[in-house]
Amino acid sequence: MSIDRIQGTDGIRRPVAPSDDPRVAGLTPQEAFLERGLITDEFLELYTYAFVSSLDDPGEIVIGWDPRDPEGRFTGAALRGIRKAGVTAVSLGICPTPGVALYLVWRGATAAFMVTASHNFRDQNGVKIFVGKHALKLFPEDDRALTRRVLSIDYAADLRDRPETGEWIDAGDEARRVFVEFHTAPVNTLSLIH
């Protein structure tokens, strides 16, 4: 089976299952995603790793998430993927999606992940990617390149036991301050419209 793009119009979203769930026993993270339609924690780790390790100059990668993963199994996996690529993960914790994009631009980081399934059901999760100084989404060719990269990595051989050499920075308080200051600045409010 030839897969062109695993991303939809705004990243990936699917029902989630822990990697030790019987429904995915014996499957690679990619097989769990493609054959069973499930995002596992291993898949999220693989996905963030695949994207970050393909960047020419990864710098810092911002990451935030919504509250649908209270145990942190899936968000922790996404963080591990960044750090296993040897890159600094700038963690915002729970925040709104626009906060991740805004903080990416404000900090001048290379890219950002938002771990969320947006308005989808609570049993789902996913990832959105923002890139560069304008917090753009991936273009279709970028989606295709990322798909090829995700499908080419052998998780068990190449990633499972890879050490987390990238740093971790907790920037949640700073990101919230930036978000509030931006949205409450008079120039950014509707109060200027008469």
Image (cartoon, grey):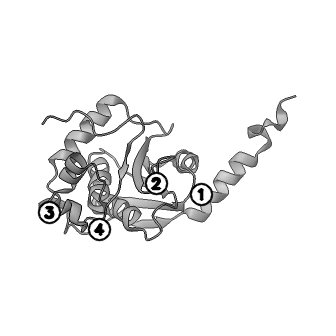
Mark 3, other Cα within 10 Å: few <14 / some 14–19 / many ≥20: few
Is 109 left or right of 146, judged from the image as shown?
Answer: right
- Residue 28 sits above or below residue 148 on the image: below
Rendered image: mark on residue 164? 4
Of pointers 1 and 4, the one earlier in the residue sequence? 4
Amino acid residing under circle 2: Val
Which quadrant of the view contains residue 191?
A: top right
Is 128 situated left or right of 32 in this image? right
At x 31%, y 36%, the residue is 143
Question: Can residue 110 be seen here?
Answer: no
Whole-percent x, y for residue 111 in the image: 42, 46
SS at mark 1 in the image: helix
Residue 187 in the image: state x and y as whole percent.
77, 38
Q: CA distance from mark 3 to mark 2?
A: 26 Å
The residues bearing labels 4 and 3 have C-alpha atoms spaced at a distance of: 15 Å
Please tell me which residue is depicted at 65% across the width and 52% down the height of the picture.
Answer: 179
Q: On residue 156, which mark appears?
A: 3
- The type of residue carrying mark 4 is Glu
The mark found on residue 175 in the picture is: 1
Task: Estimate how packed mark 2 is, as few (under 14), some (14 to 19) or many (20 or more) residues with alpha carbons within 10 Å.
Answer: many
Q: Is residue 34 above or below residue 83?
A: above
Amino acid type for the residue under numbered disc 3: Ala
In the rendered structure, the answer to whether residue 8 lies left or right of residue 25 reads right
